[in-house]
Image (cartoon, rainbow, N blue to C red):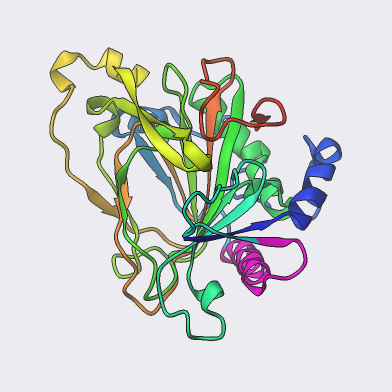
Amino acid sequence: MAAAVVQEEITAATNKLGTNKGFTESGALHLRGEDANPRILTHAQCESYDKNGYLVLPDVMSVEEASRLLDKSHRVMKQISSGGEGVKRHDMSTVGAKRPSPVGRILATFEPGDTGISNHFERRIARLGCGVHRLPTFYALTCSAFHRSIVESLGYGDARITQSQIIAKLAGIGGQIVPHQDGCVSFTNPPSGLTFWYALEDATLENGCLYVAPGSHLTTPLTQRLVAGDDGIPVFKDLPEPLWAKEAQNSGDETRNLPYEYQALEVTKGSLVLFHGNLMHKSAANKSGKDRVAYTFSIIEGGLEVPKDLYMNPTDGGFESL
């Protein structure tokens, strides 16, 4: 598998973090509801999240704002695929090749496909991560007052960003994502992972929308975590004992290890899906003629135990504050 790292724009964005932190985002994205009551989520929404492990907030950003992020996403894809200044390619097909860390960078991974066409890198991008939030446009969205209000509503006291990605899932080539839990990557003990997933285009059954298993965060503990293996390749490491979500501790033993079923989440452009780090979720391949680009980032609660060998462990200090 090939990988490409964009360093030039990330470096510029990183240099601005000190001055941009906590800014009011003049001219940046404005999210609907941001001027309302500081506690964005209602009591009923918080109860629904605790019960089901996910919450859909439709049309959080306007179509115009979502299009702005989508355009930026395509420009970053093009910058990587063109292989110009600031881009370094790594051929992971070579035995013993060392995989660069995605922390603080934008690392592109690619779907298999036709390498004979002129723009095959651009048309085969699977995802970009895991430092997308350091680009100014995405930083303005990620570190908004709106998101800080959401995490406060859900009981977080010191939310920290672990990773951020652009999930491309391009038309006709975007691959299937197998069932998994984000808390294995955004790992803490006890579990505290929370993922924000923005649809930058309509997500439908045809183009590979999310599937979630409601309540599975209560019935399915974390049993693995992602660590950096030999040559920097990420591998899953078994936990000495399963880690249950705190919500599962209040639900009783009778709910643990119960079977669950997946349901499709078709959402419109600009909608936000929140889901618990223990929630089982997946997505189908995109066999349609329409892309399904999404922006996603994850947070954890600061101050909890984070193993030093965690794959997403920052190399330049602790995780950034939301």
Q: In this view, does 67 lie above or below 144?
A: below
**Coordinates of residue 107 in the picture (x, y in percent):** 59, 54
Span highlighted in magenta in the image: 63-88
**Coordinates of residue 47 in the picture (x, y in percent):** 36, 27
Going by the image, does 216 lie left or right of 267? left
Q: Which residue is drawn at 46% across and 30% down?
A: 193
Q: Which residue is drawn at 67% across and 41% down?
A: 144
Of 25 and 289, the residue lying toward us: 289
Q: How many labels does the image show?
A: 0
Q: Residue pushed farthest front? A: 95
Q: Is residue 8 above or below residue 308?
A: below
**Coordinates of residue 243 in the picture (x, y in percent):** 33, 19
Q: State whether the magenta stretch is mostly helix, strand or loop.
A: helix
Membership of 60 in magenta stretch: no
Q: Residue pushed farthest right? A: 19
Q: Is residue 137 above or below residue 122?
A: above
Quarter occupied by residue 321: top right
Quarter occupied by residue 68: bottom right
Quadrant housing the C terminus: top right
Q: Which residue is drawn at 22% across and 27% down?
A: 219
Q: Residue at x 13, y 28 (%)?
A: 258
Membership of 71 in magenta stretch: yes
Task: Tell me if I can see residue 158 in this picture.
Answer: yes
Task: Tell me if I can see residue 276 in this picture.
Answer: no
Of 54 and 101, the residue lying toward us: 101
Of 97 and 246, the residue lying toward us: 97
